[in-house]
Amino acid sequence: MSKFQRYLIFSVLAVILLTLAGTGLRQQYQYWSIPSDARYPKLQGIPILMYHKVNPDPRTGGLGLRVPPDKFEWQMKYLKKNGYHTVSLVDVMDHFQKGKPLPDKPIVITFDDGYKDNHDFAYPIMKKYGFTGTVFVVSQAIGGTNFFDVQKKLQPENKMMNWDEIKELDAAGFTIGAHTVNHPKLAEVSPEEARWQIEESKRVLEQGLKKPVNVFAYPYGSHNDQVADLVKEAGFRAAVTTELGLAKDSQNPFKLPRVRVTGHYSNEKFIEELHKY
């Protein structure tokens, strides 16, 4: 091979590498650059974000319920840069019912079911940005695996938090809420079963945490007026649904809507959903 041929090959490879590097840098910049939400009007309510899993492993499920950690971190960074402050659902109730002040741009970040990845992936990211959240725990699944998914199949990859991990989040300022004993659709079981699911999950969590458990989430969002009354009678302060919208003081505190977040969302889609309602 002549010197000219070697030079030509080297030049072509150099151009290709520089092009790839430039593309990667542009993509990285676009991913981590954080836009301002100043172009949006002020939110007319308090957003309650709804997550399930924050996990890089596709074996733990599709992107409908799983948000990859890098995407989750972008979302937390966006909230931080734009001046959002995390509050608890009890803080929201105290504001609505007692007039207690909230910080500017309050937001509630919730996780349903109590997956171990909430502790392993979501918690360190939130801690980095000074955020706390609420984890709704299925009491019978603590320290085990997700046995209550729609297909009713054991998924060993879907490990749930154990008591030590739950207590660590609690000590870090997270709220631990109840999500029934074994994740049934409460509107489809008997009133007696619904009452037991609600009260027993509260009892188990309070016994383990040695403190009141004041908030609840309906599995699958399944509820009706009777179920909501049972949650109230059990001594909870508030409950969240899977209905979409912002929390407002005019709403039933046991039927609060949320803003769904999935792994399918682009950065732009996340911002749009936050300001959609």
Image (tube, rainbow, N blue to C red):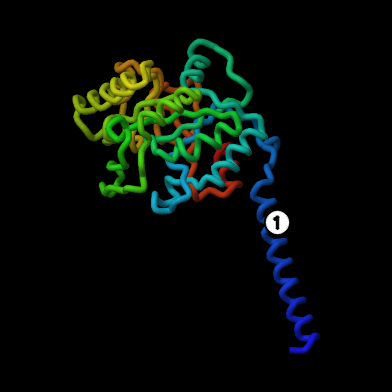
Give the amino acid at mark 1. Arg
Residue drawn at (31%, 41%) of the image: 145
Residue placed furthest toward the right: 4
Give residue 233's quadrant in the image: top left
Give residue 176's quadrant in the image: top left
Q: Which of 124 and 150 is in front in this view?
A: 124
Left or right: 104 as drawn, with respect to 273? right
Left or right: 102 as drawn, with respect to 198? right
The relative height of residue 36 versus residue 63 in the rendered view (above or below) is above
Left or right: 119 as drawn, with respect to 162? right
* Element marked by disc 1: helix
Residue 67 in view: yes
Q: Please state the horizontal and vertical placement of residue 32, each as a whole percent of the image.
A: 66, 46
The relative height of residue 35 versus residue 29 in the rendered view (above or below) is above
Residue placed furthest toward the bottom: 1
Specify few, some or many for label 1: CA neighbours under 10 Å numbering under 14, 14-19, or 20 or more.
few
Looking at the figure, which quarter contains the N terminus? Answer: bottom right
Q: Which of 116 and 3 is in front in this view?
A: 3
Left or right: 211 as drawn, with respect to 193? right
The relative height of residue 206 versus residue 135 in the rendered view (above or below) is above
Q: Mark 1 highlights which residue? A: 26
Q: Nearer the viewer, residue 140 or 2?
A: 2
Looking at the figure, which quarter contains the C terminus? Answer: top right
Q: Please state the horizontal and vertical placement of residue 168, each as a whole percent of the image.
A: 44, 27
Q: Please state the horizontal and vertical placement of residue 127, each as a whole percent of the image.
A: 56, 31
Residue drawn at (57%, 41%) of the image: 73
